[in-house]
Image (cartoon, rainbow, N blue to C red):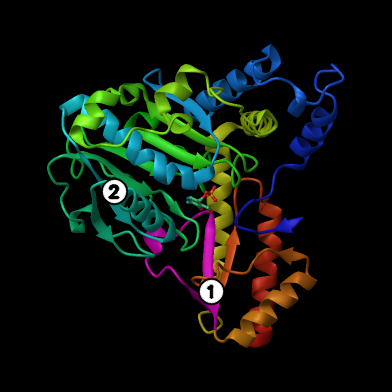
Amino acid sequence: PNYFGAGPALLPTSVLQEAAYDLINYENQNLGIGEISHRSKPAIKVIDDTKAKFAQLYNIPDTHEVFFMQGGGTTGFSSIPYNLLANYAKRTGKKGKGAYAVTGTWSKKSAEEASRLGFDVEIVNKTIGDIPPYSEWKPISKDTAYLYVCDNETVNGVEFKDIPGSEYLPEGVELVADMSSNVFSKVIDVSKYGLIMAGAQKNIGLAGLTIYIIKKTLLEQASDEELRALGLPLVPIAFHYPTVVKNNSAYNTIPIFTCHILKLVADKLLKDGGVPAIQKINEQKAQILYEALQNYPDVYLLIVTNPKVRSNMNVTFTLASPELEAKFLEEAAQHKLTGLKGHRSVGGMRASIYNAVSLQSVELLVEFVNKFAEANK
Ligand code: PLP
């Protein structure tokens, strides 16, 4: 299908076919993958294999650990301040704070959640729909444990093209990135991050699991007594990173079918040339689509005005009137191009062109974008 929905998103058909079989009968044991114990050997192997494939895909160094939790990206918003400030308390004996760069809907939600939970939050940048240079951000202040960014803002369509280095980030302040909508879409240097968090349901799998890649030193946390003494809350056990890691992501029941899908998608990515190969295709897809839209400035308006930070995953644009937008969606659907309606908070259109959306699908969309513009300019 030529489907451009923002998430849950497309999965490779070959993966779904294999997974469908495994859901009924896994490794010819007459039991489905979702029916086996999460502590059984085959289940542990699925978890270990998925971690190993991810390590291969991102060249994850030994300094970092992969683990999985339920609860989606939103649980990351809550669990990150609990865990990272418990680590900061261990490192410094102090109650630290989180610095947040708000560049769109999701980083804003994350900052609001940390603040709602009673943690100390400092907004170092607030530019919804843009990412200004770090020199324009508020400097990181004392007692900051981490800097939080949303690497790709799914709703607004802005993406970081580089990450803050030592010119902005003081030593000891950990970089935390939400990559829910661009994980495994481009090459990154994992060693630069304290923590990467990503819901699986857009680029790498199904809803039900969130991926965490954490610097191992961040798993050390102050004891319950020390946290209480500092006035910090205890971390709920199901989201307590050290406990989850100690139990190889199966402290409580892990949705093993979802994990299996992650493994199959990772497998396919590796067979197709890994992250560098998919990055190239993703760049090409984004380039031809942005170019087509920009060719007709009287018909299409790109929502992100700064070309340097336009997302390679979510392309957002509006048309001249609500009537023209409705017409665009209707005619697109007639061409079997679906999932293009923008998020209700920003309106307009959004073409999500994640890993599983083929270049061919984007070419069909570009063809339609051109044809529609010619007929309506
Ligand atoms: N972060 C980003 C970048 C997202 O795009 C989303 C959802 O679309 C979320 C977080 C929230 O994820 P979830 O619905 O899994 O809680």
Q: Nearer the viewer, residue 145 or 296?
A: 145
Q: How many marks?
A: 2
Residue 232 visible somewhere in the drawing = yes
Q: Give the residue type that dot 2 points to.
A: Gly
Residue 260 among magenta residues: no
Q: Alpha-carbon neighbours of circle 2 within 10 Å: few (<14), some, or many (≥20)? A: few
Q: Mark 1 vs ligand 1: CB under 8 Å?
A: no
Q: Earlier in the sequence, mark 2 or mark 1?
A: 2
Q: Residue at x 61, y 27 (%)?
A: 253
Image-quadrant location for residue 299: bottom right
Q: Secondary structure at mark 2?
A: loop
116 relative position to 75: left or right: left
Q: Which residue is mark 1?
A: 347
Task: Report x, y in % for residue 172.
Answer: 20, 32
Task: Report x, y in % for residue 276.
Answer: 52, 36
Q: Residue at x 53, y 76 (%)?
A: 318
Q: Is residue 209 above or below residue 372?
A: above
Residue 295 visible somewhere in the drawing = no
Residue 314 among magenta residues: yes
Locate the C terminus by quadrant: bottom right
277 relative position to 326: left or right: left
Q: Which residues are magenta?
A: 300-319
Q: Is residue 338 above or below residue 236?
A: below
Task: Report x, y in % for residue 38.
Answer: 65, 21
Q: Which residue is mark 2?
A: 118
Q: Give the residue type that dot 1 points to.
A: Gly
> Mark 2 and mark 1: span between their CA atoms?
32 Å
